[in-house]
Amino acid sequence: MKETDRIVASEDDKKRNFVLIPLTGVYLLAMLVTLSDLGGDFPFMGRLCKGDEAEHLIFANSIVSLYLIVGILKRQRLTLWLLIAYNFAASASGMANLIMLPVQQVVTASGALVPDYGYRINAFCVFLLFLLLNVFLYFHKDRFDNKSIYLW
């Protein structure tokens, strides 16, 4: 192999990877936090799911998160739109939980000793985080340049 045959990554390609690494970390952390709820109650879309239903929801959410993490690492364009949809669904679920579920019921189910206003502030901050992630994704959509619908 000659020296000229080697493919050298451009500066722009290196920048692409550095922008997506923190995004991967955010979704990995979200997946781990979701997995930590395994075996407990899980608030989803204004309902407090218990038992097998909660475990199935947590498992499904973790599998979707894992797919999104791998899609981010592969810079897949389909993953970009799935991330935006996932963020909107998570935001809608958080707001539905905040509006429809009694705060004390959620706090008691989680086993945390958090005052009502602390839970409300936390839920609203998570809602804002997901909206800001969507803005970030939209402005960095050119970073997702893999047009394949498959992860391999």
Image (spheres, rainbow, N blue to C red):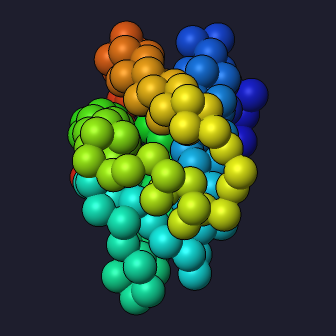
Name the image quarter holding residue 111.
Answer: bottom right
Report the residue at 57% width, 81% height from top: 39
Report the residue at 45% width, 66% height from top: 42
19 on left or right of 45: right
The quarter of the rendered structure image containing the C terminus is bottom left
Residue 84 in view, yes or no: yes
Q: Along the line of sight, which residue is nearer the eye, 116 or 98?
A: 116
103 on left or right of 112: left
Q: Is 126 situated above or below 14?
A: below
Residue 20 at what x, y percent from top left?
57, 29
Residue 95 at what x, y percent from top left?
31, 37
The quarter of the rendered structure image containing the N terminus is top right
Q: Is 47 situated above or below 124?
A: below
Residue 148 in view, yes or no: no
Q: Along the line of sight, which residue is nearer the eye, 108 or 84?
A: 108
Residue 57 at what x, y percent from top left?
37, 72
Q: Along the line of sight, which residue is nearer the eye, 24 or 16?
A: 24
Name the image quarter holding residue 61.
Answer: bottom left
Residue 133 at what x, y percent from top left?
44, 24
Q: Is 95 situated above or below 47?
A: above
